[in-house]
Amino acid sequence: MVRVAELLTALTAFLTAAVVAQTSSTSKQQPMGVYTRAETLFGGDLWGPPSQWTPVTDAVRGGSSTAALDILNQTARFSGTLDTSTLGGAGFASVRRYVDFDLSLFTGIRVVVAKADGMRYAINLKNSQQERRPDGRLEASVEFKYNFETRNSSSPQVFDAPFTAFKPYYRGREVTDPSKMPKLDLSNIQVFSIMIQSYFDAQKGNYNIVFDSIAAIGE
């Protein structure tokens, strides 16, 4: 009887461990959040004509990087050349669009990529359009940046970017001083841009990424 009791105890412990392991494994595979609200910002006809997307590159600092956004079959291709030789390892390229978004009812942005090249990109948000200086150059202003790493693949890739993950940058440097920490006003998004940077020669050369859509998402 003692032996039977020991076997039953061991079997119970084994089954309990198996259930716990299965539950743990399943929870790890669950999505980070279930979004019940979504609004497409860019996608299909909402990409608009390419003329609405203005290239902004390191040419403003004397660099040689290039950028363009082309609309292809309801998708948007961001491509060009990231040059690092002119500015000693530094370089950036982007396309900017002036918008008027109120995203205060949402918690983040979902980026759906149709095809990518394995490089690191960023989505930038600004609360104000830049003023022009007397010399014609744009005044620097704070932007809120979300970086994402792509795979070199023609398969779709999805990136969920919570607004809490957007970090403030000024003149290319992250703002870390708590006393100077700006806050992103989600009710007043005026500039939306897509960017690639060299990260001081960490990546360079031709780049090519195709976006299917970009949407605001909320729980």
Image (tube, grey):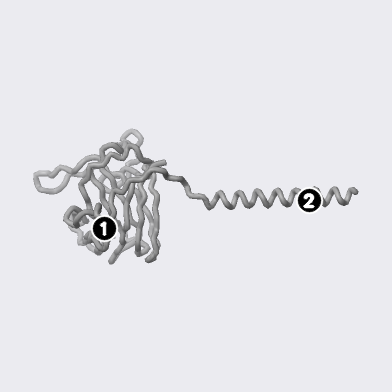
On screen, residue 188 above or below 41: above
Residue 186 figure quarter: top left
Amino acid type of the residue tagged 1 in the rendering? Gly
Amino acid type of the residue tagged 2 in the rendering? Ala
Find numbered disc 1 in the image and state the secondary structure of the residue it sits on.
loop
Residue 202 position in % (x across, y down): 35, 60
Compare residues 182 and 62 and report the one nearer the observer: 182
Circle 2 or circle 1, nearest the eye: 2
Q: Residue at x 36, y 42 (%)?
A: 163
Q: Residue furthest top?
A: 179
Residue 200 position in % (x across, y down): 31, 58
Q: Gap between marks 2 and 1, in whole Å?
A: 63 Å
Q: Quadrant of the C terminus?
A: top left
Q: Residue furthest right?
A: 1
Compare residues 63 and 79 and report the one nearer the observer: 79
Q: Which residue is mark 1?
A: 91
Q: Which residue is mark 2?
A: 10
Find numbered disc 2 in the image and state the secondary structure of the residue it sits on.
helix
Residue 66 position in % (x across, y down): 21, 61
Q: Is residue 82 visible?
A: no
Residue 85 position in % (x across, y down): 25, 64
On screen, residue 100 above or below 214: above
Classify mark 2: residues with Cα within 10 Å, few (<14), some (14-19) or many (20+).
Answer: few
Contact, CB < 8 Å: mark 2 with mark 1?
no
Q: Residue at x 26, y 48 (%)?
A: 192
Compare residues 212 and 187 and report the one nearer the observer: 212
